[in-house]
Amino acid sequence: MKGIQMITVNDVSMNFSGQPLFKHVDLKFVPGNCYGIIGANGAGKSTFLRILSGDLEPTTGEVIIPKEERMSILKQDHFQYDAYTVLDTVMMGNQHLYDVMKEKDALYEKEDFSEEDGIKASELEGEFAELNGWEAESDASKLVQGLGLNESVLYEPMSGLKESEKVKVLLAQALFGDPEIILLDEPTNGLDIEAVAWLEDFLSDYFGTVLVVSHDRHFLNNVCTHIVDIDYGGIKMYVGNYEFWYESSQLMQRVLKQQNKKNEEKIKELQEFISRFSANKSKSRQATARKKLLDKLTVEEIPASSRRYPFIGFDMDREAGKDILFVENLSKTAPDGTVLFKDITFTVNKGEKIAFVGNEMSITALFEILVGNSDPDSGSYKWGQSITYSYFPHDNSAFFNGCTLSILDWMRQYSKDQTETYLRGFLGRMLFSNDSVYKEVRVLSGGEKARCMFSRMMLFGSNMLILDSPPDPLDLESITAVNNGLSAFKGNVMFMSHDYEIVNTVADRIIELTPDRMIDKKGNYEDYVEFKKSLGEGKISLGTSYSE
């Protein structure tokens, strides 16, 4: 590790088409910290990372990074390294080391190896050793294994890997060789829970400067010492993880909205919150020295965000009876002959919120059967007579592709109250206001379509909600709203989600579904993980269902 160096951002502004994205940004990023960059979709998170990396010139200002500091960036092009082996790809995370190695190897392969070549090779050998080149293969192996890949994959071509494997290799590349600065844009996308946990541990112990953009709240909470918030056309930095930033931001908003009350009381509430959070720092996985940063926080530093949070709340027109859902010996095979699940049996009890984890194709196939969009190969299922369900499908394209209806008219299809006043009020809570309600639904972004689908579900008044990976295209604000809405709902929920916090805080029962087994465990996701650990994968037989 080199001496303490920092990234300095001086008066940086960025304009697009004459409109400011952010302006007059002054920040310092110090080694030993992990900075989570947050902001609404389109606020400029990835743009800011590109400016820091040198890939994009700011409109004004400068970014100062000491020349001796090596920066590593998580690549987003999964096909960029298809011509190379996995080992070569990972080692390219330290391009200089890789170039020295290749130059050295090329010299040794020369048929007419001269005395001059020998001198040059000797110099390269010295440089290679200085760069820890002899440990490079071992270091690369540790990284790929930590992320859940077998060591043997090192010698395979990148072109032969699955998408999920390429994601892990590119992440290993970004972490390789102890760079002083690591820039990560959505590093948890496509990672399984074990790989995410390993990455959290790696970054929590890392000596350098880490900047990360992520929609994964659990990940931000576990790794971040600071939150960098892009808001109000500016960028500000706050001490603490995402949970602390969010909770304190909400408290401050309440202070601003209740100016007629004694500010002293609200200030006291904020101070008590800070004290409570600081006392509970043990739940964070940061090193003790890092956690002490929270002690420096003052009430005056707590942000009041300009962000707008959609309201997602579900009311039941009718309470469910005792019988909810019975599934017996259900089996389904994909058109290509792949078994999705076989002979699965379970009963849903009143009020349960069940998170389905495991094979995504299997879970989607099950949901499609239960809502009547597909037929099982064998077995049966039966809904209770009082049950009404709303479904958020994995693929919502059928609702929007080629549809020329405005958002307002699209919603009118599903509403009992057809008046514009009612629909506008409803859509306003979902952040569709003024002339935006006249936008054609076919041109909406993924996040906007998701908000439309949630609005549709809210109109039905169902007592059973079925959701297939709903948070994926959403920003942090909408994900939080989904989390709050599902937690508050009094009826039944069956869902699949990639968001750790949603799964862990909403579900009171976990069903793991794969082509070869089903595990059924009451409790939240952390309970399920501990249950799996107690079993050990070696104790789980293929095709066996574990119930508790």
Image (cartoon, rainbow, N blue to C red):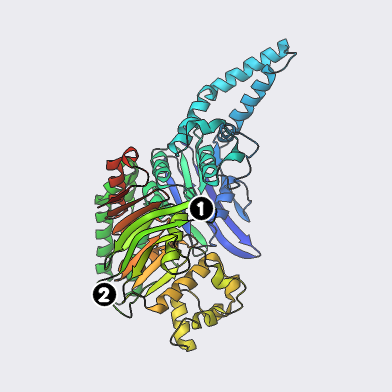
Residue 322 in picture, x, y percent from top left:
24, 72
Q: Which residue is mark 2?
A: 321
Residue 248 in picture, x, y percent from top left:
34, 61
Q: Residue furthest right?
A: 112
Answer whether residue 260 is visible to the viewer in this image.
yes
Residue 453 in picture, x, y percent from top left:
47, 71
Q: Which residue is mark 1?
A: 26
Query: As displayed, is residue 260 above or below residue 167?
Result: below
Give the SS element for disc 2: loop
Left or right for 509, reference 238: left
Give the SS element for disc 1: strand
Q: Residue furthest top?
A: 115
Answer whether residue 2 is visible to the viewer in this image.
no
Q: Residue at 43% x, 55% y: name it.
A: 498
Q: Nearer the viewer, residue 332 or 404?
A: 332
Q: Earlier in the sequence, mark 1 or mark 2?
A: 1
Q: Nearer the viewer, residue 422 or 486?
A: 486
Q: Residue at 39% x, 71% y: name it.
A: 312
**Tag 1: residue type?**
Asp
**Tag 2: residue type?**
Gly
Which quadrant of the structure image shows residue 370?
A: bottom left
Q: Nearer the viewer, residue 191 or 541?
A: 541
Which quadrant of the structure image shows residue 352?
A: bottom left
Q: Residue at 43% x, 76% y: name it.
A: 429
Label 1 environment density (alpha carbons within 10 Å; few <14, some 14–19, many ≥20): some
Q: Do the residues bearing badges 1 and 2 touch, measured as CB atoms within 8 Å?
A: no
Residue 489 in picture, x, y percent from top left:
32, 70
Of labels 1 and 2, the one closer to you: 2
Query: As displayed, is residue 396 above or below residue 170?
Result: below
- Number of labelled discs? 2
Left or right for 402, reference 418: right
